[in-house]
Image (cartoon, rainbow, N blue to C red):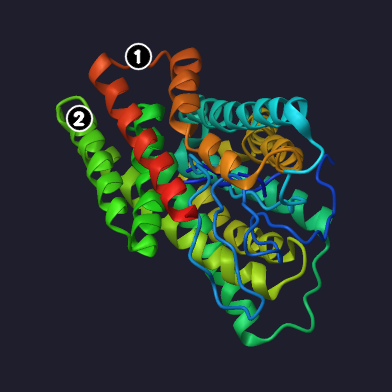
């Protein structure tokens, strides 16, 4: 819900938020990123794990990003960074991933500050509309020459993006940002465990459930509706991963993601107008909405694009599992949300489960 809202962005993304980044080079590179027609083994940042086979059938999704509804991230990377990058390149790549996560989650925190002005749905609409305009202007995807199945994958991805970001913003309107991102991370984590079908995956599932139990153990502190919205956003994140893999196999570059963002914008804009009314068109609100789109989509997309050129895919996936930490920091610094030791322990358990699932899925 974020998360990723966008191209960039996840792990258990991009995602959302629209996905990001001219930093936004128009690249048709072989390796992946959200919605990219790339190598099946190349990771996708910001909430958009999962590669596709050349035949167009989705491969087992990879849980590599965290959106926090981030918006999806759809930048193609160059793939395996094992070669000449060296330790310096790995350190730089790690710094880029951390900066991307912080940008994504601070963008979500800023959006939460604007809820009194435009409401949660209003901010979702602004973030996705601005991200879609940016991506469509940069990618200029062709509307011709696509089959019905191609459009089906793009529309499915757009619906998943709209739902994921909408649910995530409803969640952070009710519960702390760090808790929301942790709960949302369960969607890709469960998908990874199911796809893996290995006994060890059950251990990571149990660890994650333990973390969730601690986090929500005092539902007197976590609003039940906010918890439900965050879990539902995680489910839509899993759906985003599946549709992203299909769109990446059917469209060149990140054209599928750009078109999906257009679909998401068409779906969320009317809801934002109905929810916020004329307040949505206030010049200051529009300007701040554009800032949220850049922080949550554009900047993370660019940073993750360069990070993928310096880091092995597994390292990237493990780092994206730390998204709840970035969310907790953003919630504390921007929103004044303090988490107790029990909540922090819960977040650590979910992060460890996510990392374990990523490593198990790679073997």
Element on which disc 2 rests: helix
Q: Nearer the viewer, residue 261 or 356?
A: 356
Q: Is residue 138 above or below residue 105?
A: below
Q: Which mark is residue 80?
A: none
Q: Which residue is mark 2?
A: 214
Q: Quadrant of residue 104?
A: top right
Q: Which residue is mark 1?
A: 338
Q: CA distance from mark 2 to mark 1?
A: 16 Å
Q: Is residue 176 left or right of residue 359?
A: left
Task: Check disc 1: other Cα within 10 Å, few if <14, some if 14-19, many if 20+.
Answer: some
- Judge whether residue 277 can be spotted in this image: no
Element on which disc 1 rests: loop
Residue 25 percent across, percent down from the top left: 84, 48
The residue that appears at 64% across and 79% down in the rendered structure is 150
Q: Nearer the viewer, residue 363 or 272?
A: 363
Residue 78 percent across, percent down from the top left: 77, 51
Residue 228 percent across, percent down from the top left: 27, 46
Q: Is residue 215 above or below residue 42?
A: above
Q: Is residue 235 left or right of residue 94?
A: left
The residue that appears at 34% across and 29% down in the rendered structure is 347
Q: Nearer the viewer, residue 189 or 240?
A: 189
């Amino acid at each position: 819900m974020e998360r990723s809202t966008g191209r960039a962005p996840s792990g258990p993304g991009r995602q959302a938020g629209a996905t990001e980044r001219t930093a936004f080079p128009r690249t048709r590179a072989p390796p992946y990123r959200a919605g990219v027609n790339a190598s099946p083994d190349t990771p996708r940042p910001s909430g958009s794990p999962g590669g596709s086979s050349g035949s167009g059938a989705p491969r087992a999704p990879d849980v590599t990003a965290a959106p926090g509804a981030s918006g999806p991230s759809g930048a193609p990377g160059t793939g395996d960074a094992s070669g000449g990058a060296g330790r310096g390149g790995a350190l730089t790549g790690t710094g880029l991933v951390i900066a991307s996560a912080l940008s994504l989650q601070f963008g979500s925190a800023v959006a939460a500050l604007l809820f009194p002005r435009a409401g949660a749905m209003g901010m979702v609409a602004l973030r996705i509309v601005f991200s879609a305009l940016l991506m469509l202007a940069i990618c200029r995807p062709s509307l011709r020459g696509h089959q019905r199945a191609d459009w089906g994958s793009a529309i499915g991805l757009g619906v998943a993006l709209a739902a994921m970001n909408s649910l995530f913003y409803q969640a952070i309107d009710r519960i702390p940002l760090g808790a929301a991102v942790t709960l949302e991370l369960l969607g890709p984590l469960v998908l990874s465990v199911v796809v893996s079908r290995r006994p060890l995956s059950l251990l990571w599932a149990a660890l994650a459930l333990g973390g969730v139990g601690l986090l929500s153990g005092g539902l007197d502190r976590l609003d039940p509706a906010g918890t439900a919205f965050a879990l539902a956003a995680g489910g839509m994140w899993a759906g985003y991963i599946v549709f992203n893999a299909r769109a990446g196999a059917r469209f060149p570059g990140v054209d599928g993601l750009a078109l999906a963002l257009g679909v998401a914008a068409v779906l969320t804009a009317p809801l934002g107008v109905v929810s916020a009314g004329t307040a949505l068109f206030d010049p200051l609100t529009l300007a701040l909405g554009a800032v949220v789109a850049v922080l949550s989509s554009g900047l993370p997309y660019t940073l993750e694009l360069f990070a993928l050129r310096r880091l092995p895919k597994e390292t990237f996936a493990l780092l994206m599992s730390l998204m709840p930490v970035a969310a907790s920091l953003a919630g504390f610094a921007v929103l004044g949300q303090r988490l107790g030791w029990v909540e922090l322990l819960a977040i650590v358990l979910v992060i460890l489960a996510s990392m374990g699932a990523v490593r198990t899925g790679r073997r």
